[in-house]
Image (tube, coloured by chain):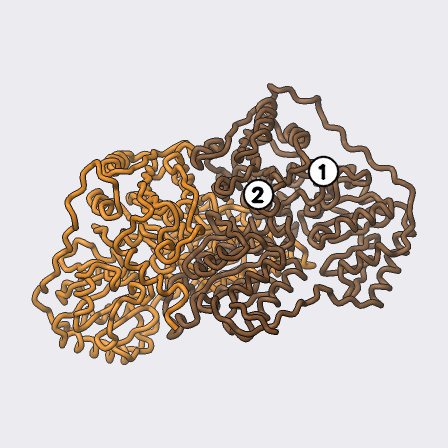
Chain colours: A orange, B brown
Amino acid sequence: MPKRLSIGRYLLDQLHRHGVEHVFGVPGDYVLAFYDLIEKSPIDCIGTTREDSAGFAADAYARVRGLGAVCVTYCVGGLNVTNPVAGAYAEKSPVIVISGAPGLKEREHNPLLHHRVRGFATQREIFSRITVASTSLEDPVTAYHEIDRVIHAVERYKRPGYIELPRDMLDVVHPHVHRDRSLQEETDAAALAECIAEATAMLNESRHPVILAGVEVHRFGLQDALIELVDKMQAPVAATIMGKSVISETHPLYLGVYEGAVGQTAVQKAVESADCVLALGCFMSDINLGVYTANLAPSRTISATSEKTSIRRHSFENVPFRSFFKALLKARLRRRRKPRMPKPEPTKGSSPRDGDRITMRTLYPMLNSFLTDDMVVISDVGDCLFGAVDLTIHRRTEFLSPAYYTSMGFGVPAAVGAQVANRSLRPLVLVGDGAFQMTGLELSTVVRLGLNPVVVVLNNHGYSTERMIMDGPFNDILGWNFSKVPDVLGSGWGFVARTVGDVRKALEASLANRDSFSLIEVDLDPRDVSPALARLGERLGKQVKGPPK
Amino acid sequence: MPKRLSIGRYLLDQLHRHGVEHVFGVPGDYVLAFYDLIEKSPIDCIGTTREDSAGFAADAYARVRGLGAVCVTYCVGGLNVTNPVAGAYAEKSPVIVISGAPGLKEREHNPLLHHRVRGFATQREIFSRITVASTSLEDPVTAYHEIDRVIHAVERYKRPGYIELPRDMLDVVHPHVHRDRSLQEETDAAALAECIAEATAMLNESRHPVILAGVEVHRFGLQDALIELVDKMQAPVAATIMGKSVISETHPLYLGVYEGAVGQTAVQKAVESADCVLALGCFMSDINLGVYTANLAPSRTISATSEKTSIRRHSFENVPFRSFFKALLKARLRRRRKPRMPKPEPTKGSSPRDGDRITMRTLYPMLNSFLTDDMVVISDVGDCLFGAVDLTIHRRTEFLSPAYYTSMGFGVPAAVGAQVANRSLRPLVLVGDGAFQMTGLELSTVVRLGLNPVVVVLNNHGYSTERMIMDGPFNDILGWNFSKVPDVLGSGWGFVARTVGDVRKALEASLANRDSFSLIEVDLDPRDVSPALARLGERLGKQVKGPPK
């Protein structure tokens, strides 16, 4: 029997069925009635100070929970989430954008309604460029099916979708039948068999294969399958920076993050000397590949992602990532003897004393020693991200960062999304001074919700990553008294740390403070950069006007 | 003889020739080399904390100076200015967006370069929807001409344009010839003559005509022509809210702001009882028309804008706004006797005492008495904008607001743009607590540049405009200690004002403080709204689910 839900109710029902319990956003008049409907539903509204923060929060929520949603008003709201949504598209985070819009009746005679830019379709046209599926619910006959179609595409491709809701369609009811669409992708069984046979032979012939695990292992929920595969093959496994934490970094076969010459030398050596690399769900992006310092010869590479599965230089049609992964687990893979693992590089220099000036080199080992099992590390963009390569994440899926799209300002809003997604996770946010100035005041929402992230502001006094490439006065920013932010927000603890001892005490106090956020400004020398950034800057500097002509 | 400038140098040269002396933005690696080039040019870089702030600042700069520019990096920068650029499009502000992009050489083999979303053209496609002209300078043969074409279109239509600069094209030199394109629009002389004859007859036959002046009078620099016309016709003149301050509000024939039932009754009566309304450069948008409470019968209306010139119910092709305006000035218009002007409405209630709680009703007359000739009033969106209707602006073009597109967060960044555009203007910013939480920390740039705006935060504890329409917990926001913001920024004066006396003292101290910004938090009762908002909320409340079906 067909159900009789209004279009607005159906949308909320479907989101909830797919695991969405919180929606992030800022209300506005074209979406107010929908906000009212959310209030009356089992889904909670999480208001942020700005829409782009809501976008980043929904992205982090999606990374932790599998699906996220952001709800905004027309144009002045929607156009403020294009950047976070583009980032979610680039990094495969399944976020659904719901935007209010003028009612269809209001649009008659084409009036100049407030918030309108060009035509009524302008916003939808823009989002069609940065989502896998987009729709405007203008026809009751198709609206229910359209909602299903967008959610289905978002779940299948792990990329954002867009649903526009003219405000006078919210309460419209039309008979509808919901058919659960299967999320199975089409698999060509013969092609899969051929592909698996070839991959198995190549792996079995190899003497020392290495697995390279990427972010899609996380997006498609294959972390357990990965451990199974690693244990079955007894092959060492490295992660890309985007895939960092898809496997517990304390796993005995874990090598570390592979990032070409930018990452640790031992990891680079182990991966690049392997006679077969099994790359699973890895984006072959420039940052992931250490700005092209990576040396992964196609002739010894098997690579499977949701977009392409290939062995050496040929690829297979209709061999989806998940099917490939599961079939490989069942394949007759040769079990090897436990490989010899490279020893971790010893920390250079003597152990720092409390009175020493804090440096990037001494900070990260200290952070490492403070990491607990209930923490999720969220890194913003900049040297904090390069330094984060050396953090040891205990459990899986506990490192979030925009390491490919690299949009500054992700960190603090993402902490809101991650902790709302899982209240038992405590975020440790690593953020530079420049990125904090972009979105750090989203701590306002942290206070409203009673969350308790520890925010470490790495204050290197300007845009340091850019200074490495090309310096000029445009890389200077105002020095803020970051530790006074709690005074503005009326909650939270603030610290300024200049020495090793300051950092230690601030970290201890922050961990003990479970009732509010803690903000630790780590005052670094402007010339102090992580070893990884020093190497990266050298490479990027050569490319600032493009590669040599 | 053809010149020999590189593409990057030519772009800067042309911007400078057209009056751009400052470019707003945030640097990033794809645009760093261009930033370096700006440093070496006569144009100054103004770095903001976020790209959207740079967009709002460039918009305000364009409103004050006639052309503005924002310079950002690829996607993570560009996609953060879609909202301010859409606002500039909707409100006809000539802003040029310059975006860095990956070099053409880097794009070979279609790699996953950082910041890339979908295809390399994604960002340009998005901007093509919200600009009048867009280009990517990928071919040296056409690049110079393309720069001219975009700047020309921006100047002609007073709307944004988009120029994308692949970083390896910056230093490319190709012979080029610059031809100054005339900004003359095509005018059909016969149609103009017919139109002017009809308009003249209609105006001369009318017994009590009224002029309604809109924002395009400002955009096309016709303020002097307007005064000439008003004096010649001896007709009373009202302004739309977007056109507020296109004529000095102390002009003897000035009626006030016409905004239907939302504005003052005397102005509504004067305009709606006129037997002929000459609407010049008015956007007929919902907010401008008092959310459709306006009653302007087409049968007695002459309307000219850059998009359409019409008399009663018929319109004329190729009769551009400027041509119409200039021809009308030369027409034989009957000079009338000085009309009787309605008396300004008396302020209700007795004059407030120092100990009284401050209210919206008492605040605005106080602000009025503090306005000086060197001030530019910048209103953000919300009740501050409705209340601002009653401010008396002394000189022309000294009221800036996003009154049609109504994007929150315009105020503080716009103050940066306006004061950079004209250092002798001192901004008085009116901003609500919600809008301040979006972009108020852009005061950081105010401090860096040594600017001295007076920022009045109207703290009514939540999204009050929305509360009027539909209330719920989604309209609640965190209460900030706004007056502590100077502590975070290390500069500026902060005040909290709860009484009439507090406001008076804070305003006096702020005006005396010429060395830094001043921030006055005016603590209002959450239920206290301006009379205009009370009327508007009532109207919008009925429309929240669309007009009655």
Residue A191: percent from the left, percent from the top?
Answer: 28, 79
- Whether residue A141 is visible: no
Is residue A257 found left or right of B99 in the rendered image? left
How many numbered circles does the render carry?
Answer: 2
**Residue assigned mark 2:** B415
Which of B541/B332 is in front?
B332
Circle 2 residues within 10 Å: few <14, some 14–19, many ≥20: many
Q: Which numbered tag is attached to residue A401?
A: none
* Labelled pair 2, 1 in contact (Cβ < 8 Å): no
Report the Cα–Cα distance between label 2 and label 1. Answer: 18 Å
* Residue occupied by mark 1: B394
Q: Residue at x 19, y 44 (%)?
A: A369
Image quarter of the C terminus of chain A = bottom left
Image position, residue A81 (x, y; %)? 47, 54
Residue at the extreme front: B1
Residue depicted at x 60% and y 19%: B355
Give neighbour class at mark 1: few <14, some 14-19, many 20+ (Cα, 10 Å).
many
**Amino acid type, residue under disc 2 in the picture:** Ala
Q: Chain of mark 2?
A: B
Q: Secondary structure at mark 1?
A: loop
Which chain is indicated by disc 1?
Answer: B
Residue B13 in sight from this viewpoint: yes
Residue B545 location, x and y as percent?
Answer: 59, 49
Q: Earlier along the polypeptide chain: callout 2 or callout 1? A: 1
Amino acid at dot 1: His
Q: Is residue B127 left or right of residue A336?
A: right
Determine whether B477 is above or below A246 in the image.
above
